[in-house]
Amino acid sequence: MHSFGYRANSLLTFAVTILAFMCAIVSFSFSNQTPSAQIQILNINWFQKQPHGNDEVSLTLNITADLQSLFTWNTKQVFAFVAAEYKTSKNSLNQVSLWDAIIPEKEHAKFWIQISNKYRFIDQGYNLRRKDFNLTLHWHVMPKTGKMFADKIVMSGYSLPDAYR
Amino acid sequence: MGWIGETVDSIKSIKIRQLLTQAVTLGMIVTSALIIWKALMCVTGTESPVVVVLSGSMEPGFQRGDILFLRMTKEPIRTGEIVVFNIDGRDIPIVHRAIEVHERKTTGEVDVLTKGDNNDVDDIGLYADGQMWLHRHHIMGRAVGFLPYVGWVTIIMTEKPIIKYILIGALGLLVITSKD
């Protein structure tokens, strides 16, 4: 019972158990999180019905956000993305991601960016004319170890024009 | 000759009892591991509560060799969730993020499009021929927690099976030769 093998074995088991416990515990450390964001649609670049019958629209967005309060010592990166949410007659919810970015450090988390949509905004059908939609900024906090958190800010009041252009 | 026969008999009887005890102990260890695994499957609601990240398509968030903890609830799939899914015809599960979701009003079923964070294009190329969307039955779970580096053990054992055999051989040897 006192050989080197037994002692090394129980020491190792104990150390691994404590390490696993600590990795799990870090998920419970919350900090004061007050992120903010604003999105403006600067321009509707074009709005067409594609040959396969689905509407597609291209937008230029102006995104301002401050996600610095989401970063803690355990944060590896924050994945932020902007999605358009709207209802149609066939679908109770449509969510289309328009832009995303990986924020690796706190310094990069306060930003202002003006881009056209990174991913194509295509509907399942041709329901987008005069459509009201929300723009949501989601963030997904990916930790160095432990539980991942996600949340969003919903901004409403955006709409698409009546006619194709 | 008598005492040789006696010694052989006593050696045989000790060995059998010891062997049986060791076999039962080993059996107990294996079955309790199985019980824990099945219980985890019940609690998390998914067939594989823990997966290892095999590709670099979600870097820098998930590196190859990380372990993900999954959960599957009845809540609908929404964009931004990291989902693990199987494509018909492939047996390796893929871990990517949902970037587009369309939910049918009548049935509540969802069409989901996914993309790896580190990929330039969405996953349409990965889906089966003619498949444009993922549905709920393709998705095994959502990633909720994460442990770095621990999955390398599984990757090494899968890619170099020799190490698996050496490990099991060594463990077997340890069990047989230990006096407990």
Image: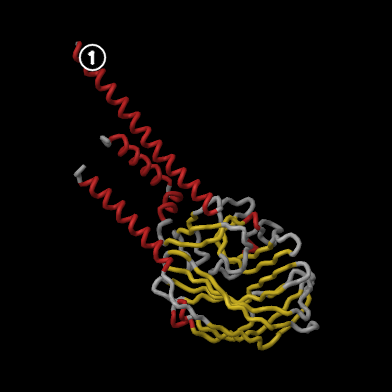
Position of residue A1 measured from the top left corner of the image (x, y, whole percent): 21, 42
**Amino acid type of the residue that numbered disc 1 sits on in the rendered structure:** Gly
| Residue at screen point 39% across, 62% down | A23
Q: Nearer the viewer, residue B12 or A115?
A: B12
Q: Residues within 10 Å of mark 1 (few under 14, many from 20)?
A: few
Q: Position of residue B69 (x, y in %)?
A: 49, 58
Residue underneath mark 1: B5
| B102 to the left or right of B167 | right
Lateral position of residue B84 relative to residue B12, left or right: right
Residue B165 location in percent, x, y? Answer: 39, 42
Q: Is residue A136 above or below residue B134?
A: below
Image quadrant holding the C terminus of chain A, namely bottom right
Question: How many badges with numbers are in the image?
Answer: 1
Residue at the image point whose x is 37% and y is 58% from the top: A20
The part of the image, by quadrant, that contains residue B66 is bottom left
Between residues A164 and A70, which one lies in front from this camera angle?
A: A70
Quadrant location of residue B137? bottom right
* Residue visible at 40% across and 45% down in the picture: B164
Q: Is residue B42 left or right of residue B16?
A: right
To which quarter of the image does residue A117 belong? bottom right
Residue at the limit of the structure toward the top, as seen here: B1
Residue found at the very far bottom of the displayed protein? A42
The answer to whether residue A118 of the structure is visible from this angle is: no
Query: In the image, is residue B103 above or below residue B151?
Result: below
Q: Chain of mark 1?
A: B
